[in-house]
Image (cartoon, rainbow, N blue to C red):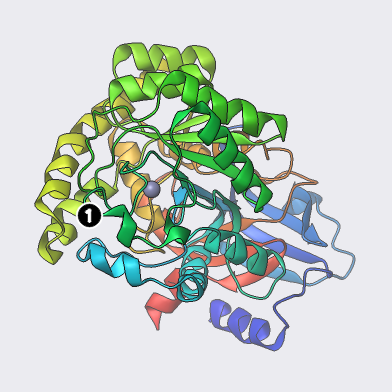
Amino acid sequence: MRILTTVVALLLLPLAASAESRLLHAGKVIDVDNATVRVDQVIAVTDGKIQSVLPYSQQAFAGKVLEDWTAFTVAPGFMDMHTHLSGDIQFADTEAYLRAKPEDDVLIGANNARKTLEAGFTTVRDVGSYNAFTDVALRNAIAKGWIPGPRMFVAGAYITVPGGGGEVSGLIDTARIPARMRVGVAKGEREVSAKTRLLLDNGVDWIKMIVTGAVLTDGTQVNQSEYSETEVRAAVETAGKRGHFVTAHAHGAQGIKNAVRGGVRSIEHASLIDDEGIALAKAKGTWLVMDIYNGDYIDTVGRAQGWSAESLQKNLDTTEAQRIGFTKALKAGVHLAYGTDAGVYPHGDNAKQFPYMVRYGMSPMQAIQAATIESARLLQQSQQLGSLQAGKTADLVAMACNPIEDISCTAQVYWVMKDGNIYPGKAQHEKH
Ligand SMILES: [Zn+2]
């Protein structure tokens, strides 16, 4: 009943009500900075920023309306460091990629962005689009408030060798692939630097470099290194001069080491990482973004949909190994951020990885920290994002139960706030 009243009240309000102050009376608040849960708190939000988080007994209300969120546990907005929002999953039909139009991909992306936000993910790092720069258009439209979606940090396209893991397919004659899907193709240090500059000139935030073959790119091998340490360094130094970072897609143990030694800020997948690679990542402070949920999705839904036998086999070769590597890296104290490869599985299911991270060794608090403050640190945005602190951006999620007690509560998102604006969460849609 209380929830219903709030729904009606919100429907009467314009969504862009960030200029006004809000007081949210939360039953529980997850403090990721101090790894603790605080009960009976009031979160004050003004102009899209958190003004204060104080115990209910200490908050001065001054006649302001208190929104009753006492039934909810509130966490900082979740952050997914590995998504592909623009375009559609086409792994059952690689040829369909060649027909994908950029204008369609952006609009498909708008739909995916809304689903992602409703799942409680207020920030994503979107690590590559086949149709180059569709993610830049999507990021800008969200930032301007034209469409609902998470704050995006985008890569624009893949820096990949000809026929490499970042191509639409390693088996299709490249002459048949539209040029807009090969914008980041580069071989050798000079070309890598030139393509890095080209992507940055087109407004990307991050450089995504495909350093080994990929599970879902036929004709490439996950254990095969496609770039050397010096080629990686060329991208890292070129991007670094303009204040940007590189993240490396790498499955194989050698490719991971090439990327870490080359100076990337993070490694995506890191499936076959060995002890030396873990020690190296630890020593250099490199983040690992290990997508330990989606292997199960590929093996069930992908298999049922007839994804290629090669992809399904490579998925089996990497899934369990990656989970073992995740546990080892966690024990070694390597930085681990939350990244799921959304786009391989349907958008809006991003929270499905939380229980996997707990199953493979994290406490629920650690898993939530990975998806909030740790991801904010990876992005070098922890001054603005990642925790519920005065002065930070008002990004938060309200869940129907406490994920510290039951991690699956991360999928029970009732309300999402981004930049101080409130959106109904996924759990409300599922109820109706
Ligand atoms: Zn990916």
Would the CB of label 1 be found within 8 Å of ligand 1?
no
| The one of 263 and 79 positioned closer to us in this rendering | 263
Residue depicted at 32% across the width and 65% down the height: 97
Q: Which residue is mark 1?
A: 297
Residue depicted at 42% across the width and 62% down the height: 412
Give the image location of residue 321, x and y in percent.
21, 30
Give the image location of residue 86, x and y in percent.
47, 64
**Viewed as shown, does residue 62 lie left or right of 137?**
right
Whether residue 34 is visible, yes or no, is yes
**Viewed as shown, does residue 259 lie left or right of 296?**
right
225 to 160, vertically: above or below: above
Give the image location of residue 247, x and y in percent.
50, 35
Residue depicted at 43% across the width and 70% down the height: 427
| The one of 400 and 337 positioned closer to us in this rendering | 337
- Indicate the quadrant containing the C terminus: top left, top right, bottom left or bottom right: bottom left
Q: Residues within 10 Å of mark 1 (few under 14, many from 20)?
A: few
| The one of 383 and 262 positioned closer to us in this rendering | 262
Quarter of the image for residue 47 reads bottom right
Mark 1 residue type: Tyr
427 to 179, vertically: above or below: below
Quarter of the image for residue 34 reads top right
Quarter of the image for residue 24 reads bottom right
Q: Secondary structure at mark 1?
A: helix
As drawn, the residue found furthest toward the right would be 62
